[in-house]
Image (cartoon, rainbow, N blue to C red):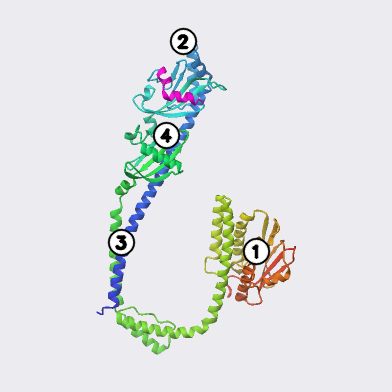
Amino acid sequence: MHPGSLFRKITCVVVLGVLAISAFTLVAARNMTRQGYIETMNYSNRQIMAMVQAKMEAMNDRITDVELTINNSWAFSQYLKTEPENPRTFTLVYDMIKQLDTVKPDTFYDVAVVGLNEQSYVSNQSSLSISVKELLGSRITQEAREHPNRILYRYVPQGITKNSKGSSAFIALKALASPGSQAVYGFVYVVMTQRDLQAFFDNLGNSTNNLMLLDESGTVVSSPNHSLVGQKDEELKQIIRDMDSHKENSRYTTLQNKPVLMLTRTMPRWNLHIVSAFDYIRALNEMQGSAYILLVCLAVTALVLAAVFIFISQITRPINKLVHTMDKVTEKGLPDHVEVIQGGYEVQQLSKAFHIMIEHLNRYMRQLIELEREKRRMEIHTLQMQINPHFIYNTLTSIKWLIWQKDSEKAIRSIDTFSMLLHSTIGGSRSLISVSEEVENLKNYIFLQKIRFGQQIQANIYLSPSASGCQIPKLLLQPFLENSFFHAFADRKRGVISVLIDCHNESLCCEIIDDGVGMPQSKADRLLTARPDEDSYSIGIRNVNARVHLLFGERYGVKIFSEPGHGTSVKVTLPVIRKGSDTSE
């Protein structure tokens, strides 16, 4: 076997290529799987945090209703202001319970009400686990006294009611004051135990994701991981504070020397942060599926290699096919095309030489025929490529204006419209499109320009039903509409542009009329013949006129009529081309 034979080359290249691609695919699939897993967990954790926040915000509304009802209740006010042995106490307590039941669900946290007269009341048939004096002198009560108009949420290591005794608790408290007065006569406490707080999580945490409620001091108020509750983490507190200062809600960082993906949500009314510390390294190590990916890659590689070897063995015997091809040329003359025979080294060299010879002969014969056609096609393509950058530049200028105005919603819509406009005009291989498509492009362009000009310039399109199905070179009318927007109203703030499209005497007539400043007719005539370096304003018009002449002949083209102070009228005349005709694409 020849050292440079096709079999050896293909075998070496294909085997090495397949192995390289398999290795690359394995690494890429593994990385994509890992990244996808992290993104999925990130999204899942965000959803979990959103659910927790929604539950807690709903509960905040209930707590607010309860505490405001108590604050505005005459019965509670009288109970907390009268002497303990007052005969009306029983009646007041009955009224208090009745009023509280109207806003408090059947299953609700302990609600404790304490007055400066040392009277107290606790719902759910419970009672205080500490003395009234001790509660009134506590730090959280003093804070509520200092902020009588706010509902404060505070973490305490021990609950203040018998139902919450022996467990840390989270208390919503508010000072009670008479309407229109700042004189405090009591306090209301809504006591949430750890079991109550755990209900917000519904076992949503796991071994790789620590969910926490963190207060401003860095204390973990609640977490599915019970060992974290009550701990004060200065490192975590500093991370959250730094994220808040940079307005971040997610960050890759380290916590206790472990890399984590930190997510936060702020709940100002609770004075808490919902925190998710996702140990993504551990999660990736526990992730299943790596072995499955490896097995699939190995199996696919083995199948590909087997198919390659079978294929190579087949293409090493093509000598008979080459001989048969040569005989056909001898008998039937020069063919249009000769297929290159793939085979061993010797056969490949013979086949390539024979193929080159036939191709050279055919190419020489085709050159004269294709020369004029190629020249014509390249001229049209060159003109098209001159139009597109001019159009793109002006359109991007309008979008830039909108972004400068900081209107992101309209900017996004403008970019979407611009994308559709580029796709329909620049994208695709068709040089002819329907008039209705061109009109849609004009509407998109008008929308983009109105972002910049507003309603000062009105643009109207009138399309005859008989003309909507005709074919037209794409991006033909847009340069005229563009020039009207940018040049017709230079000295005026308002104006009207009208586009009229109709079929008349076997011709498609497109007319763009504006009531702008106009120009002398001599200048209008020069726009169709001026060189680009002589008058940049005429680039688009001159290119359109040249395209029409190249495509349809000198009979068709562009005419401009203008008079200073009376606007400008541009008339484009084209042949009527229906889809499916010889001249349409």
- Residue named by callout 2: 85
CA separation, marks 4 and 3? 50 Å
Q: Residue at x 43, y 87 (%)?
A: 334
Residue 200 shows up from this direction: no
- As helix, strand or loop, the secondary structure at mark 4 comes to loop
Residue range (magenta): 132-148
Q: Report crowding for label 3: few under 14, some 14 to 19, many 20 or more residues within 10 A (C-alpha).
A: some
First in sequence: mark 4 or mark 3? 3
Q: Amino acid at mark 2?
A: Glu
Between label 4 and label 3, give the one nearer the viewer: 4
Residue 412 percent coordinates (x, y): 54, 53
Residue at the location (36% across, 87% down)? 327
Which of the two discs, 3 and 2, labels the residue nearer the N terminus? 3
* Nearer to us in this view, 574 or 576: 574
Residue type at numbered disc 1: Asn
Q: Nearer the viewer, mark 1 or mark 3?
A: 1
Q: Nearer the viewer, mark 1 or mark 2?
A: 1
Image quarter where the N terminus lies is bottom left
> Residue 136 appears at what percent x and percent y?
43, 20
Provide the residue designation for mark 3. 23
Which structural element holds mark 2? loop
Q: Image quadrant for the C terminus?
A: bottom right
Three-letter residue code for mark 4: Glu
Which residue is farthest bottom? 331
Disc 4 designates what residue? Answer: 216
Measured Cα–Cα span from mark 1 to mark 2: 92 Å
Q: Which of the pair 334/242 is nearer the observer?
A: 242
Q: Nearer the viewer, mark 2 or mark 4?
A: 4
- Give the label on residue 483, or none: 1
- The alpha-carbon separation of the residues under discs 1 and 3 comes to 56 Å
Which circle, 4 or 1, is nearer the viewer?
4
Residue 87, horizontal then vertical, whole percent:
49, 10
